[in-house]
């Protein structure tokens, strides 16, 4: 569904990505692993349209979208949950969810019951301000807001960062459920190896802006991957 093909990205004279390729398929979780500062977030920002690409291409369902702005990619079915969640702290939970309506047609603008089946805690917090939620609750809200868009591709940037273990388990359950439904492709950026290994169908490890390991879950050798995750 979503593919980066030989992508190169620069920040001024500094090269952040070097001919990086990555594919996300329907019904699969593709994990991007690596230490801080190796280019993981730059890669997915390029894929969702928030970072310009110097060379290479971004393809969506076989169509070249390299020049398409981020809002058009969102309207076409690519949802992004950024690192740090970036919810609106002064808006209520319900208002945060409704902010996801911007990318879908007016007739489809409805918060489905499925959102509360996936994240039951949000149902009792609709009137609370987003900034009053715990970090884990805010992460659930950010993912729910992305799902409001009814995406075909869901891109998650380190959803376990700073989250308590019980919420991590809830998020893992939701990601696995969404994958198993077979209606969307999921790209997951992660540093937490065990979380990634349990969910990944395919993986790519970045180091200094390049893919140094890639393959299926069966190809994932823990010692090899951890070598690129430890500081």
Image: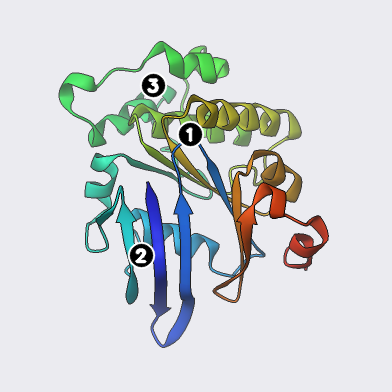
Q: Residue 51's mark? A: 2
Q: Position of residue 11 (x, y in %)?
A: 41, 78
Q: Residues within 10 Å of mark 1 (few under 14, many from 20)?
A: many
Q: Position of residue 33 (x, y in %)?
A: 63, 58
List the residue tagged with mark 1.
143
Direction from residue 135 to residue 105 in the image, left or right: left
Q: Is residue 54 above or below residue 85?
A: below
Q: Residues within 10 Å of mark 3 (few under 14, many from 20)?
A: some
Give the mark count. 3
Q: Residues within 10 Å of mark 2 (few under 14, many from 20)?
A: some
List the residue tagged with mark 3.
94
Depth check: give the residue in front, 208 or 85.
Answer: 208
Under circle 3, the secondary element is helix
Q: Position of residue 195 (x, y in %)?
A: 70, 42
Identity of the residue furthest to the right in this view: 223
Q: Position of residue 109 (x, y in %)?
A: 24, 21
């Amino acid at each position: 569904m979503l593919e980066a093909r030989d992508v190169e990205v620069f920040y001024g004279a500094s090269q952040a990505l070097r001919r990086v390729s990555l594919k996300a398929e329907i019904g699969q979780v593709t994990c991007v692993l690596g230490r801080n500062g190796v280019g993981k977030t730059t890669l997915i920002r390029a894929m969702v349209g928030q970072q310009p690409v110097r060379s290479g291409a971004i393809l969506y369902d076989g169509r070249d979208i390299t020049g398409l702005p981020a809002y058009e990619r969102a309207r076409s079915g690519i949802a992004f949950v950024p690192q740090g969640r970036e919810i609106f702290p002064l808006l209520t939970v319900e208002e945060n969810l409704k902010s996801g309506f911007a990318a879908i047609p007016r007739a489809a603008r409805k918060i489905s019951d499925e959102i509360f089946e996936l994240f039951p805690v949000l149902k009792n917090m609709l009137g609370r301000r987003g900034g009053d939620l715990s970090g884990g609750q805010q992460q659930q809200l950010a993912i729910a807001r992305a799902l409001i868009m009814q995406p075909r591709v869901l891109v998650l940037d380190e959803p376990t960062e700073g989250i308590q273990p019980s919420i991590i388990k809830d998020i893992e359950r939701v990601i696995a459920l969404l994958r198993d439904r077979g209606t969307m492709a999921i790209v997951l950026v992660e540093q937490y190896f065990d979380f990634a290994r349990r969910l990944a169908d395919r993986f790519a490890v970045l180091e200094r802006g390049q893919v140094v390991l890639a393959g299926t879950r069966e190809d994932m050798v823990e010692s090899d991957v951890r070598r690129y995750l430890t500081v």
